[in-house]
Amino acid sequence: MTQPEVYESIQNDQALNASFWVNIALAGLVTLLFVYMGRNLEDPRAKLIWVATLMVPLVSISSYTGLASGLTVSFLEMPAGHALAGDEVLTMWGRYLTWTFSTPMILLALGMLAGTNLTKLFTAITADIAMCVTGLAAAMTTSSYALRWFWYFISCTFFLVVLYVLLAEWPRDAEAAGTDEIFGLLRNLTVVLWLGYPIFWALGAEGLAVLDVAITSWAYSILDIGAKYIFAYLLLNWIATNERVIAQQPAGIGTGVEPEPGTGTPAED
Ligand code: RET
């Protein structure tokens, strides 16, 4: 199918088209709101969290414009074994591509809030990017149904790394940084909503095809509203009133938790 034909079929599916445009409008509005909310920040670390957070709706506008215009949507013929084998299924592969840019921003903001160190930040972000890219591969593989699910499994493995950092490493760092309360809230919101994405992938047209394309698209759009805009609003609202807590963290990318007494370099006295 040519791009104008894809565009026409999106235009003809009002529910699908609305799931894109509602998000473009929302992302535009929250960008303005977030610029306003961060206008008085001065500490460089607080500003970095703000810039990373601001990038999320900006990436979103580009992502949804790609989908609405048909640029990042393709009709792919599903392989034998798939519930819709032989059919051309509308695949919104642009979503997985642009998550590669938006989700690292969310993790950068969360990691900075927790005052984590470079190693843990790098681990979470690279695993997250790998999760999105292998998720893209799962959606785009048309040669074999089993390999689609194999990619899905690889992506889930990377997701487990992200979950490990979020649930086991950063809470301790956040406690040491004095940001544990807000971190805990944002971590819970993130973990619960992010788990929704692989579930809807598996149930949607790309996986078991229990849900149709428009419903899956709305599910992703609603998850996006929580995981991006509500998340970002809560974070910026806290930063705007608690900039001092962030400014007090040690310079650099944060040191993470203090080493146990008796380990590491002896203190100078
Ligand atoms: C896929 C399918 C393969 C398995 C897994 C997935 C996870 C996706 C996630 C996406 C989060 C997206 C967000 C976007 C905001 O802009 C790729 C669906 C594990 C967790 C938060």
Image (cartoon, rainbow, N blue to C red):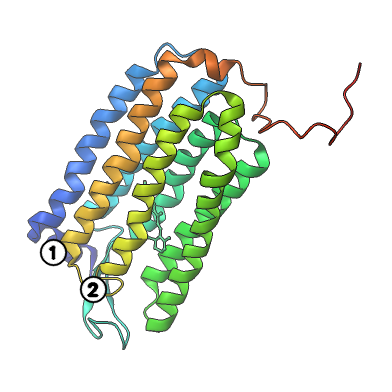
Is 56 placed left or right of 42 in the picture? left
Q: Which residue is rendered at x = 13% and y = 61% of the image?
A: 8
x, y percent for residue 103: 44, 46
x, y percent for residue 259: 75, 34
Residue picked out by circle 2 = 209
Which is nearer the eye, 154 or 267?
267
- Asked whether the beta carbons under mark 2 and mark 1 sit within 8 Å of each other, the answer is no
Would you say residue 87 is visible in this rendering? Answer: yes
Residue picked out by circle 1 = 9
Which residue is situated farthest in the right direction here? 269
The residue type indicated by label 1 comes to Ser
Q: Secondary structure at mark 2?
A: loop
Q: Which residue is rendered at x = 53% and y = 12% of the image?
A: 244
Is 216 placed left or right of 62 in the picture? left
Q: Which residue is rendered at x = 67% and y = 33% of the image?
A: 257
Locate the N terminus and report the quarter of the image it occupies.
bottom left
Query: Which quarter of the picture shows residue 83?
Result: bottom left
